[in-house]
Amino acid sequence: MQNNKREKTRIIEVFTGIVLILSTLSVLIAFLTNFEFASPDRSIEEDLNFLSESALQQKTSAITWLVTGVLFVFLLPLYLMVFYRFQRWMQVINGLLITAMAMLFFRTGMAGFSIANIIESVPGGQILQPENQLLSFIRDSMLLIKIGLTAYGGYIFVLSITIFRRIKFSGFLTILLFLSGPVLIVYTWLNPEHIITTSSLAISAIGLLMTGTKLVNKGLLREEE
């Protein structure tokens, strides 16, 4: 009976590690390929003309955010099954943050598709009547990404302070996540296009990828007592 329980735990750890790796890569890809809807160097008319010529890029960006949201939906139960025994109330907070990320990133993808559909529905790219609706979707998309990345930074920070000491993850890994989470939150709102925002996202991704790899190895290589 004990051996069966241990085997189930190992399987869950492996799947958790794999989904954590995939969701982390998906966030990074979605951020790096995120479609920029506006530019300070162009007028609104020029931006709208640019949108009318970039429907494929918009849909590609929307798909990456949708995939990211779906992956976090799969991550939620696996994460709680593996980590819930460590400072449970903190893991409940992280569970709520993961849920928020899944919803926000999914809504970001849906907003992206709505923008692309509006653009494609107007013949010749002459955007007149739908302009207010279009700008509303653009504002919503930009805000959803900021809130989603804020939740992501909080999730990273909570993860770093609750579990590593107990399950013997490296100090280097803990520091990566501990520092990158708050920095990502601050710069997401101060300047989302700043190199520090991208760097903190990349550093946090390294930490989470190492965490996922650690879980996979722990599940595959742990010796039976």
Image: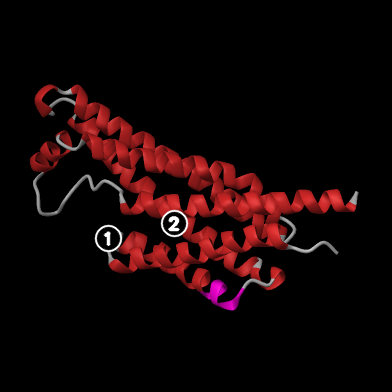
Quadrant holding the C terminus: bottom right
Q: Which mark is residue 46?
A: none
Q: SS for tag 2?
A: helix
Q: Residue at image x 26%, y 38%?
A: 58
Would residue 220 be counted in the magenta stretch? no
Up-down relation of residue 191 to residue 97 (above or below): below
Left or right: 131 as drawn, with respect to 112: left
> Alpha-carbon neighbours of circle 2 within 10 Å: few (<14), some, or many (≥20)?
many
The quarter of the picture where residue 111 lies is: top left
Q: Position of residue 87 (x, y in %)?
A: 71, 62
Looking at the rendered image, the disc whose residue lies closer to the viewer, 1 or 2, is 1
Q: Nearer the viewer, residue 116 or 104?
A: 116
Give the magenta range. Answer: 170-175
**What amino acid does circle 1 point to?**
Glu
Residue 193 circle label:
1
Image location of residue 190, percent across then percent down: 31, 63
Using the rendered view, name the quadrant where residue 158 is placed. Answer: bottom right
Quarter location, residue 54: top left
Residue 187 visible in this rendered orientation of the protein:
yes
Q: Is residue 224 left or right of residue 45?
A: right
Identify the residue at image location x=31%, y=59%.
192
How far across and how far down the image is residue 176, in percent?
A: 50, 72
Whether residue 152 is situated above or below residue 71 in the rendered picture? below
Disc 1 to disc 2, C-alpha distance: 15 Å
| Secondary structure beneath label 1 | loop
Q: Position of residue 142 (x, y in %)?
A: 31, 47
In the image, what residue type sits under mark 2?
Answer: Thr
Q: Residue at x 37, y 49 (%)?
A: 30
Q: Earlier in the sequence, mark 1 or mark 2?
A: 2
Asked whether 51 or 24 is in front, the reply is 24
Whether residue 174 is in magenta: the answer is: yes
Residue with the mark numbered 2? 150
